[in-house]
Image (cartoon, grey):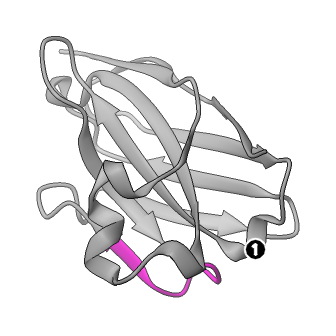
Amino acid sequence: QVQLVESGGGLVQAGGSLRLSCAFSGRTFSVYAMGWFRQAPGKEREFVAALGRSGSNTFYAASLKGRFTISRDNAKNTLYLQMINLKPEDTAVYYCAAERFDRITSSSSLYLQENYGSWGQGTQVTVSS
């Protein structure tokens, strides 16, 4: 089964940057579509970004595009989320998620958490003002 382990979270000042990593194991990474979601205190988990098997097709929450960049290194079995110009409202637990590409029926499916079968435990990102 797929195992996902996020890392790279922490405390950062507003305007700062962080890069999150998600280590993938248990299956062949390159056949999985991957996504990042986040959950702020008292709020529902929301979509952040996703990409396909090769990483050439990327998808972002409209409000985050331009500050967040998702990427993957299939040789290292790792997913990344580069975050710049962080804001206090970015404070949340960030989760990576995975699903086999052949179970993703359309690109729009990548935006929905119910379409991902594997999840990491999350990493906390706290942005201070």
Look at label 1 and name its amino acid.
Answer: Ser
The image shows residue 83, relative to residue 98, as above or below, that is above
The residue segment tinted magenta is 53-59
The image shows residue 24, relative to residue 124, as above or below, that is below
Across and down, in percent, residue 16 comes to: 37, 33
Location of the N terminus by quadrant is top right
Count of number-bearing discs: 1
Residue 76 vs residue 115, the one in the foreground: 115
Across and down, in percent, residue 129 comes to: 17, 15
Residue 64 vs residue 57, the one in the foreground: 57
Across and down, in percent, residue 88 comes to: 18, 23
Across and down, in percent, residue 50 comes to: 42, 64
Q: Residues within 10 Å of mark 1 (few under 14, many from 20)?
A: some
Q: Please give left or right for residue 70 compared with residue 129 in the image.
A: right
- Toward which corner of the image does residue 76 lie, by quadrant? bottom right
Q: Secondary structure at mark 1?
A: helix
- Residue, x 13% and y 64% (percent of image)? 62
Q: Please give left or right for residue 48 compared with residue 77 in the image.
A: left
Residue 125 vs residue 16, the one in the foreground: 125
Magenta: main secondary structure equals loop
- Residue, x 71% and y 75% (percent of image)? 31
Q: Which residue is mark 1?
A: 30
Q: Please give left or right for residue 31 compared with residue 100 in the image.
A: right
* Magenta-drawn stretch contains 58: yes
- Residue, x 81% and y 58% (percent of image)? 77
